Image (spheres, rainbow, N blue to C red):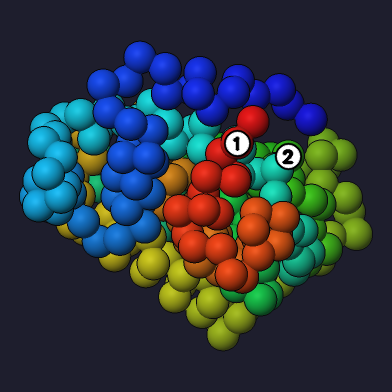
């Protein structure tokens, strides 16, 4: 179990109260809002913020929030639907590899500047490290993804018993799920750097996992707890 600094230390030195920081980051990741939308909303509550301040909060705190929430993650299923989609970073299209299980629960994501065998292998390695070894992987017809799995099996990184299949019907689940992320990205008016894009998408995926019930909320206050209370409990060291 990783060691976390106390929550008070995590927000030490900030001009604003930690509740405001968490609220802005949580709303930005969860809803179709731009930084300027959040600035206007906070101004109506008597909190004067610059959009660059919220940007720094998102970049700084999102990875830490992901690590703390991960302690309460539920196990996902072993039948994966894997696919890649496009997102724009620095005005250029890059590739977002994602997978869900057969129940629609998010497995993992990987952002890549290329769409090739190495990118597909990098995604699968990341997914297996953070989750579990799949029993089945459903792909589209793109040859590089099939070759990536063949090579991982040959290297012993993926068990030979893992079934691979191609099914447009079964992969509708992941294609529909891409829309959740892409709809959230649209109001952001373009991601300016690759590292920032990876952090922000990681935060969006976290928010989506929370909505999908992929965490043991019972340990964070249960159904009666409000979302701020649940987040407060999740982030506690």
Q: Quadrant of residue 66?
A: top right
Residue for point 70% across, 62% down: 218
Residue for point 51% across, 38% down: 65
Of residue 91 and residue 44, the one placed in the foreground of this image is 44
Judge left or right: residue 194 versus residue 161.
Answer: left
Residue for point 59% across, 23% down: 6
First of labels 2, 1 by sequence position: 2
Q: Position of residue 72 (x, y in %)?
A: 70, 50
Quadrant housing the N terminus = top right
> Which residue is under mark 2?
129
Judge left or right: residue 96 versus residue 15.
Answer: right
Of residue 69 and residue 198, the one placed in the foreground of this image is 69
> Which residue is under mark 1?
236
- Secondary structure beneath disc 1? loop
Q: Position of residue 229 (x, y in %)?
A: 51, 53
Compared with residue 204, is residue 183 higher up or lower down, i.e. above or below?
A: below
Residue neighbourhood size for the residue with mark 2, other residues' Cα within 10 Å, grouped as few (<14), some (14–19), many (≥20) = few
Mark 2 and mark 1: Cα distance apart in space: 25 Å
Q: Position of residue 121 (x, y in %)?
A: 63, 42
- Secondary structure beneath disc 2? helix
């Amino acid at each position: 179990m990783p060691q976390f600094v106390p929550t008070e230390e995590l927000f030490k030195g900030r001009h604003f109260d930690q509740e405001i920081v968490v609220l802005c980051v949580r709303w930005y990741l969860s809803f179709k809002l731009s930084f300027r939308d959040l600035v206007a909303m906070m101004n109506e509550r008597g909190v004067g913020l610059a959009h660059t301040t919220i940007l720094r909060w998102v970049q700084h705190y999102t990875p830490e929030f992901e690590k703390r929430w991960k302690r309460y993650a539920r196990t996902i299923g072993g039948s994966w639907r894997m696919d890649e989609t496009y997102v724009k970073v620095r005005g250029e299209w890059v590739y977002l590899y994602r997978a869900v299980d057969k129940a629609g629960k998010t497995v993992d994501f990987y952002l890549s500047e290329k769409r090739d065998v190495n990118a597909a292998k990098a995604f699968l390695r990341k997914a297996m490290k953070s989750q579990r070894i799949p029993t089945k992987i459903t792909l589209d017809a793109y040859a590089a993804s099939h070759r990536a799995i063949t090579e991982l099996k040959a290297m012993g990184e993926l068990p030979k018993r893992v079934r691979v299949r191609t099914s447009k019907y079964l992969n509708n689940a992941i294609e529909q799920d891409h829309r959740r992320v892409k709809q959230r990205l649209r109001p952001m008016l373009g991601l300016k750097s690759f590292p920032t894009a990876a952090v922000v998408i990681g935060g969006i995926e976290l928010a989506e996992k929370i909505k999908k019930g992929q965490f043991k909320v019972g340990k964070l206050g249960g159904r009666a707890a409000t979302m701020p209370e649940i987040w407060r409990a999740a982030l506690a060291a």
